[in-house]
Image: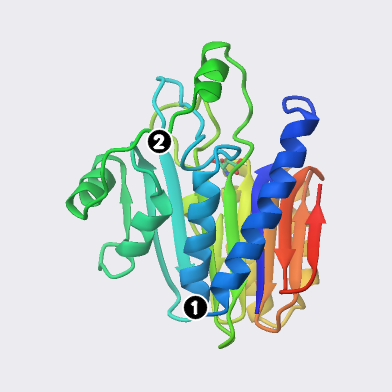
């Protein structure tokens, strides 16, 4: 069993040292709690659980604490991929729900598994998700002061369970100040992808991640026999060719873990029941 989670990028220029330390502590606590959960749950249940904890922590740009778009509204996106069934589900630009990943989770049972905007919200309401504002005063202040944080703080989790199954989940409040209707990578296969060989969750500039097809490419390379580390490195070499800004966490079916970022300020933690691997 293995788990790795990320809390997006950290920027020294727009966040304090205290925020950085808080993020590291929060990631450690959530990785540990999620690993305990993984002992009695599947990979797909665990990645959802971990991402709900991350969405509920206002340090991150996902769920509570999400960034505000150019028109003053918050729209969130989240997706889930079950490596065993190879099914993907997600919500794009959903408003006023507490945990977007939980809506992606219940969409798994539908034929129509990726819903956007008002349709996603209507589906959530019909399925018992009550109105919830994820806005926090800090984000409103940043919005009013036109402080562009660049979407730092998207969250994600990949896990390998005791039956050798893999899953990935990712959730975001987007880039902040985006044109209404802009679609993040987080609910696409470029930002979140898994199969029986590998699971990947990304963060960074959505446009770069989509252009590079980051998560899907890493998974396909591992599926075709490339070792995980090389699959990640080759994909990031290609990202560099387009001057892309992104980070990824990954696990393969053997329990190898990888993380890479184009600019080394990503915050992540992996946990295997005994040891933490913490970066940034
Ligand atoms: N990937 C997210 C987006 O572009 C933002 C982020 O990961 O920081 O919407």
Residue 42 is situated, as x and y percent measured from the top left of the image, at 49, 78
Q: Residue 256: percent from the left, percent from the top?
A: 75, 76
Secondary structure state at the residue bearing disc 2: loop
7 relative position to 280: left or right? left
Marker disc for residue 42: 1
- Is residue 89 visible in the rendered image? The answer is yes
* Residue 36 vertical placement versus 261 (above, below): below
Task: Give the Cα distance between marks 2 and 1.
Answer: 29 Å
Q: Is 175 placed above or below 230 here? A: above
Q: Residue at the spot x=70%, y=43% of the render?
A: 23
Instruction: Provide the residue designation for mark 2.
Output: 75
Q: Where does the image place residue 253, in percent across and percent down from the top left?
A: 65, 82
Q: Quadrant of residue 197?
A: bottom right
Residue in view at x 80 percent, y 62 percent: 277
Question: Label for residue 210?
Answer: none
Q: Which of marks 2 and 1 is in front?
A: 1
Depth check, front residue: 201 or 128? 128
Mark 1 lies on a secondary structure that is loop
Say above or below: 30 vs 211: below
User: Which comes before the other along the chain, label 2 or label 1?
Assistant: 1
Instruction: Determine if residue 11 is in view.
Output: no
């Amino acid at each position: 069993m293995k788990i790795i989670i990320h809390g997006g990028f950290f920027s020294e220029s727009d966040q304090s040292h205290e925020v950085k330390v808080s993020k590291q502590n929060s990631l450690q606590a959530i990785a540990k709690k999620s690993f305990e959960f993984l002992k009695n749950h599947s990979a797909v249940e665990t990645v959802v659980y971990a991402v709900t904890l991350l969405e509920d922590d206002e340090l991150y740009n996902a769920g509570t604490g999400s960034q505000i778009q150019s028109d003053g509204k918050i729209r969130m996106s989240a997706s889930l991929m079950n490596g065993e069934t190879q099914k993907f589900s997600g919500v794009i630009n959903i408003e006023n729900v507490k945990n977007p990943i939980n809506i992606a989770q219940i969409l798994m049972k539908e034929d129509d598994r990726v819903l956007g905007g008002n349709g996603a919200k209507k589906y959530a309401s019909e399925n018992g998700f009550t109105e919830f504002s994820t806005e926090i005063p800090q984000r409103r202040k940043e919005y009013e002061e036109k402080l562009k944080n660049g979407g730092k703080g998207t969250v994600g989790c990949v896990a390998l369970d005791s039956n050798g199954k893999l899953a990935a989940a990712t959730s975001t409040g987007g880039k902040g100040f985006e044109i209404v209707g802009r679609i993040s990578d987080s609910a696409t296969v470029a930002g979140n992808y898994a199969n029986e060989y590998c699971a990947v969750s990304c963060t960074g500039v959505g446009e770069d991640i989509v252009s590079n097809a980051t998560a899907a490419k890493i998974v396909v390379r591992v599926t075709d026999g490339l070792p995980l580390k090389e699959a990640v490195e080759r994909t990031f070499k290609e990202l560099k060719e387009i001057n892309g800004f992104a980070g990824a966490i990954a696990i393969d079916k053997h329990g190898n873990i990888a993380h890479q970022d184009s600019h080394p300020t990503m915050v992540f933690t992996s946990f295997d029941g005994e040891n933490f691997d913490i970066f940034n």
